[in-house]
Image (tube, coloured by chain):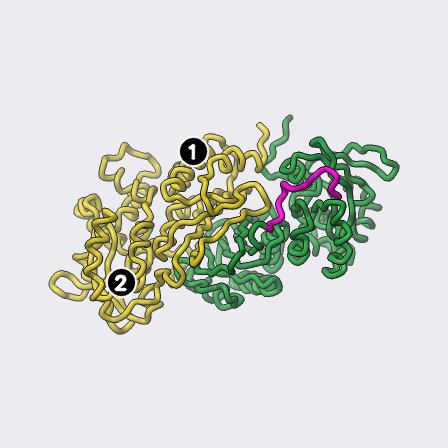
Chain colours: A yellow, B green
């Protein structure tokens, strides 16, 4: 069958794009044209997912599409931005219509859920990789940054972390002989493949959080970015770090995996700091967005990240986040 | 040596970013924040270059960086947009500091020449590929589209085409044993590796051209996009299609390569249509921008692209543009 890049774009992507008042010209010209609401700034971020690096090679087309947009939306969430539009650069080793149909349908689903239209893209032949650049709006000067944490601020974490890391562990164990998975494993793997970016929470935290980041590389690594950008330290209570029931149950049987909870990412929860006098506003936000917000520690002076147990003993921990470029010293 | 993604970004990219009044927050947070000039629309385009597909594997890091931004700037040129900012997703098989230094220096050079700051990026481990998303400004409603060509409009082409296709031919011939190349070959290869996007010309054509496209896939293929989008046909005079002296000289010795001049892209010239009464304005534009503008044909009714020789005989031609997904019928 003969198929051109233009046919792929028209058949799978252009026809499924979400309509939006700000899109003056969408897919199909040399570039897209978008208008800007008044008094807003544009928040932009780009992220690539590569097969075998950012997702297991056996990941379904639908899960890949979901995750590729979700991880970019999560960056908008961490800035408190409202989704505006995105572009897609898709590199494919070959044209498989079933794959493209599942990928584009799932991409249209998540783009419709989060109301973010696809405005342009590029489809090339090459090893499977997906690059998405998202743009979002914030009121001028209102973006949530990493750099605003102050000594005395309290540190919070949305939802729960660790499921994605445990889900990946399960998939890696099963890779040779995919087993019938139980409901527990399915929950963990689903968190890995279908992250839910905290878009509404991020917008609600604008004007309340002093600093914010999304958990993509692991709690310790990502919180460390806030500490470095804000020139402060942090004191965390391990017992307060929220784990899902699935993760708690799994760790009971596999205690050696505990450090991966803190050092692996892909959870896409928000970690943020709030000045003491504003913490009272969080309860209403948690209720409105059906999202638990756990108080996990506080910002202190200095530059290190300290972890304590329930008896206030300081704990050693591995600080070993995932970095695909990091080569260990021998 | 141990090196993280964050060190790569800081060392090679963040420190070299061009300053710009619209960049509220550049590289280093979850996302960048940019402000918008009043009464402007944003033009956005994304393009990927993959090693071995979009450039020969032996291409230098400096040439790759230049071309990756240039081909995206060319899309802005085709829309008549002024460069605003860009994001970079760079996938690298391994960290080679010499390569990264040459790549980032060349990227900073072209970004400084065209005054377009890098605002954010993602660096991942994977097969070598470079995805850039550019954004530009146009006055509201003034973007040059493919869809405005009218019967009777005259068709123009900037500069000359074919050098890049011949340069690629030369490189492919030499790939096993790179020879000392003469000045002619060097000129052709340089056009392939260092395209000059027609940014100033594109902006000057706003309000004058009825339709515009950049030559990335070949003159016939790209002009056909205008014809399809505008629901018109075209009549071209082969003798008027501008070739460089280097290309003319090369074709004298290699006449069989003539069709590649029209069917291969990478020239990044602008092909555009102008209503008869506005053609008088082109001479001043050509002078101001030191850029020849050749009158190559006119828009006719119908939907086909017709090619004529100097004696007004209609010519057959291969319509065989490059498409990396196209699989030929047997």
| Crowd around label 1: few <14 · some 14–19 · many ≥20 (10 Å) | some
Residue A48, position as x, y percentages in the image: 45, 50
Identify the image quadrant of the C terminus of chain A: bottom left
- Is residue B55 in view? no
Query: Secondary structure under badge 2?
Result: strand
Decide whether the magenta segment is chiefly helix, strand or loop: loop
Residue A56, position as x, y percentages in the image: 38, 42
Residue highlighted by disc 2: A273
Vertical side of B115 occupied by A135: above or below: above
Range drawn in magenta: B142-154
Vertical side of A17 occupied by A255: above or below: below
Residue highlighted by disc 1: A102
Q: In this rendering, would A150 be left or right of B281?
A: left
In the displayed image of the protein, which residue is found farthest to the left? A311
Residue A133, position as x, y percentages in the image: 46, 50
Q: Is residue A114 magenta?
A: no
* Spatial separation of the CA atoms under disc 2 and disc 1: 39 Å
Q: In this rendering, would B25 be left or right of A231?
A: right
**Numbered disc in front, either 2 or 1:** 2
């Amino acid at each position: 069958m003969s198929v051109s890049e233009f046919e792929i774009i028209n058949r799978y992507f252009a026809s499924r794009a979400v309509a939006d008042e700000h899109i003056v010209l969408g897919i199909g010209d040399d570039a897209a044209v978008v208008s800007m609401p008044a008094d807003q700034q544009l928040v932009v971020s780009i992220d690539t997912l590569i097969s075998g690096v950012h997702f297991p090679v056996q990941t379904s087309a639908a899960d890949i599409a979901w995750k590729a947009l979700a991880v970019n939306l999560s960056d908008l969430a961490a800035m408190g931005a409202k989704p505006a539009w995105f572009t897609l650069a898709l590199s494919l080793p070959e044209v498989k219509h079933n794959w493209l149909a599942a990928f584009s349908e799932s991409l249209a689903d998540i783009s419709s859920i989060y109301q973010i239209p696809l405005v342009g893209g590029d489809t090339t032949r090459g090893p499977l990789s997906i690059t998405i650049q998202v743009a979002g709006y914030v009121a001028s000067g209102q973006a949530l940054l990493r750099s605003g944490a102050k000594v005395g601020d309290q540190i919070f974490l949305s939802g729960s972390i660790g499921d994605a890391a445990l889900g990946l562990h399960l998939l890696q164990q099963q890779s040779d002989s995919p087993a019938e998975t139980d409901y527990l494993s399915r929950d963990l793997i689903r968190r890995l493949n279908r992250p839910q970016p905290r878009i509404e929470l991020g917008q609600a935290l604008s004007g309340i959080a002093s600093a914010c980041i999304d958990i993509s590389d692991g709690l310790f690594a990502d919180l460390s970015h806030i500490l470095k950008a804000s020139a402060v330290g942090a004191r965390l209570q391990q017992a307060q770090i929220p784990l899902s029931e699935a993760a708690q149950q799994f760790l009971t049987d596999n205690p050696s995996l505990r450090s991966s909870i803190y050092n692996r990412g892909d959870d896409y929860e928000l970690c943020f700091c709030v000045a003491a006098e504003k913490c009272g506003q969080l309860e209403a936000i948690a209720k409105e967005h059906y999202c638990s917000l756990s108080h996990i520690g506080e910002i202190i002076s200095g530059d290190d990240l300290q972890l304590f147990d329930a008896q206030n003993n300081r704990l050693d921990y591995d600080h070993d986040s995932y970095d695909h470029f990091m080569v260990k010293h021998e």
